Amino acid sequence: MEEAKTKIILDEKAAYTKAEHFCAYQERAQQEVRDKLYEYGLHQNAVENIVSTLITEGFINEERFANAYARGKFNQKGWGKIKIKQGLKFKKVPDVLIKKALLGIPYDDYIRMLQKVLTKKAAQVTEKNAYKRKYKLQQYALSRGYEGDIIADILKEMVD
């Protein structure tokens, strides 16, 4: 088994330059940047100095990251709010910013996406029994992070 090779960068300036490029490539959470800097073998003081400088210079912005993450996961992957919230919590984004990002998803678009996800899955489900079919679709939508009550409403509309 080969071990993953990580470059050890002891120079804080070199690590800062790498972190700048890392953040410029796409929006990043503070925790992602910290993790990357620790991979370089830097100590806590150096990591915190670099992160605070990146925040000051606008390379890291948690609110911008949370909004981009929520929009991206919703539009590209069709995730529901529950799954997006879990993803943001995993990245250690503050709850206030998570709520703000989720409010950025329009309700009409959210319902349309859930309908699209369920319609696409319904075409793949081969179950003949209507009750089991509905259950499978419901479980699928739950796994995608949608709320149970909204799923039930959409499934009622689809069956009727």
Image: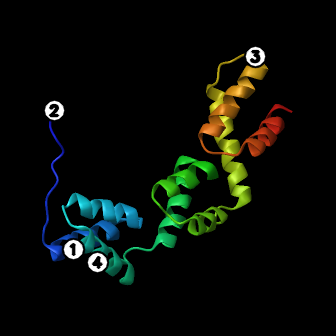
The amino acid type of the residue labelled 2 equals Met
Identify the mark nearer the N-term, 2 or 4. Answer: 2
Please tell me which residue lies in front, 5 or 72: 5
- Amino acid bearing label 4: Asn
Q: Amino acid at mark 1?
A: Thr
Q: Residue at x 78, y 21 (%)?
A: 130
Q: Quadrant of residue 91?
A: bottom left
* Residue carrying label 4: 49
The amino acid marked with disc number 3 is Asn
Q: Looking at the rendered structure, which numbered label has been put on residue 17?
A: 1
Say which of marks 2 and 1 sits in front. Answer: 2
Q: Looking at the image, is 59 positioned above or below residue 30?
A: below
How many discs appear? Answer: 4
Q: Marks 3 and 1, how far apart in space? A: 59 Å
Q: Position of residue 87 (x, y in %)?
A: 51, 52
Which mark's residue is nearer the viewer, 2 or 3? 2
- Mark nearer the viewer, 2 or 4: 4
* Marks 2 and 4 in Cβ contact (< 8 Å): no
Residue of label 2:
1
Q: Residue at x 65, y 61 (%)?
A: 105
Q: Is residue 80 visible?
A: no
Q: Are marks 2 and 3 in contact (CB under 8 Å)?
A: no
Q: Secondary structure at mark 1?
A: helix
- Label 2 to label 1, Cα distance in Å? 32 Å
- In this orientation, which residue lies closer to the viewer: 139 or 53? 53
Question: Is the residue 148 above or below the residue 75 in the image?
Answer: above
Mark 4: secondary structure: helix
User: Residue at (17%, 53%) from the top-left corner?
Assistant: 6
State which tag comes first along the sequence, 3 or 1. Answer: 1
